[in-house]
Image (spheres, grey):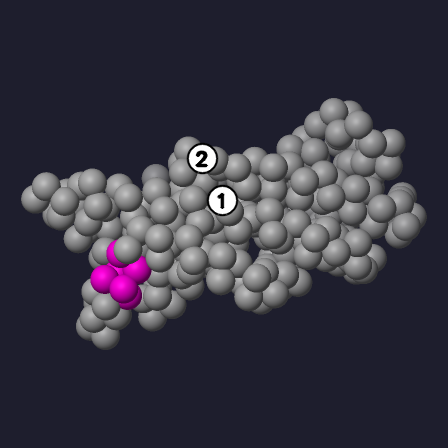
């Protein structure tokens, strides 16, 4: 049984290596300018689609992939509170933090587009030959800090409306001091801002992968040229 699992894992690794090599060879036939332009067009479309999808009512709350719940230990505590008849307050908090994320996302559109516009040829090649997380890694490196600074006040204002922010911070702070919660999750606004960025990058990456799978449906000649050569 172990030999069979080892053989399957080895086969998967070989297939992955062959796939990456094929991509590299295909990219070698493209000019650097074409590769960069095609990826920029694809990512620009991905940014537009992600912001439109998430920056609206239920963009986060109604999407299980990015819906923001309470972190770890607090989620377990919330379930206990619900069983004790406190479900309405918990639901209000969950709704408010997801609404905060939905309100914040559109404010990052220009920074995301600027990151795409200023992308270097090296950045483009790294993404095109990288794995599923290459797009997420690129945007996180280029935009996480400035987007976080822009989102935080909006998230803070939105979450305070429900009146549970101080209680969350006090309870979460104690949980963090006992090692039950990550320190960065002990402040509600900071926690929601981080999860908002995670969800945003996730959806941008999904949109970009969809364009890779179906370049003909992207509606852009340069996108079709670049991604079509990788099939």
Q: Which residues are magenta?
A: 164-169
Write down the quadrant of residue 206 in the picture.
top right
Q: Position of residue 10 (x, y in %)?
A: 53, 45
* Residue 217, x across and y down, in percent: 74, 25
User: Residue 42, can we see it?
Assistant: yes
Whole-Å distance between the Cαs marked 2 and 1?
A: 8 Å
Q: Nearer the viewer, residue 180 or 163?
A: 163
Q: Quadrant of the N terminus?
A: top left
Q: Residue at x 60, y 52 (%)?
A: 107
Local SS, label 1: helix
Dominant SS type (magenta): helix
Against 184, is 98 above or below? Answer: above
Q: Is residue 165 left or right of residue 65?
A: left
Q: Do residues under tags 2 and 1 come within 8 Å of each other at their CB atoms?
A: yes
Q: Residues within 10 Å of mark 2 (few under 14, many from 20)?
A: some
Which quadrant is home to the C terminus? top right
**Which residue is depicted at the point 56% across and 35% down?**
53
Q: Residues within 10 Å of mark 1 (few under 14, many from 20)?
A: many
Give yes or no for residue 127 being in the magenta stretch.
no
What residue is shown at x 34% (from left), y 42% (from top)? Answer: 95
Is residue 158 left or right of 220 when viewed as pictured?
A: left
Q: Is residue 211 above or below residue 138?
A: above
Answer whether residue 11 is visible to the viewer in this image: no
Location of mark 1 (residue)? 102
- Residue under pointer 2: 58
| Local secondary structure at mark 2 | loop
Sequence-wise first label, 2 or 1: 2
Q: Is residue 175 above or below residue 82?
A: below
Residue 103 spot, x, y in % from top left = 51, 47
């Amino acid at each position: 049984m172990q030999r069979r699992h080892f053989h399957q894992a080895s086969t998967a690794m070989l297939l992955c290596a062959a796939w990456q090599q094929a991509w590299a060879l295909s990219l070698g036939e493209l000019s650097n300018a074409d590769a960069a332009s095609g990826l920029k067009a694809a990512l620009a479309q991905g940014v537009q689609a992600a912001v439109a999808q998430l920056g609206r009512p239920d963009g986060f709350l109604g999407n299980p992939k990015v819906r923001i719940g309470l972190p770890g230990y607090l989620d377990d505590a919330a379930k206990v509170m619900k069983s004790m008849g406190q479900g309405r307050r918990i639901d209000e908090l969950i709704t408010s933090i997801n609404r905060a994320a939905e309100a914040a996302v559109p404010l990052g559109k220009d920074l995301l587009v600027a990151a795409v516009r200023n992308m270097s040829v090296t950045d483009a090649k790294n993404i095109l030959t990288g794995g599923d997380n290459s797009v997420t890694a690129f945007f996180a490196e280029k935009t996480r800090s400035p987007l976080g600074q822009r989102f935080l006040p909006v998230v803070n204002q939105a979450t305070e409306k429900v009146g549970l922010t101080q209680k969350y911070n006090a309870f979460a702070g104690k949980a963090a001091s006992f090692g039950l919660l990550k320190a960065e999750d002990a402040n509600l606004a900071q926690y929601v801002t981080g999860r908002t960025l995670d969800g945003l990058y996730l959806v941008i990456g999904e949109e970009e992968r969809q364009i890779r799978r179906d370049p003909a449906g992207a509606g852009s000649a340069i996108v079709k040229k670049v991604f079509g050569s990788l099939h």
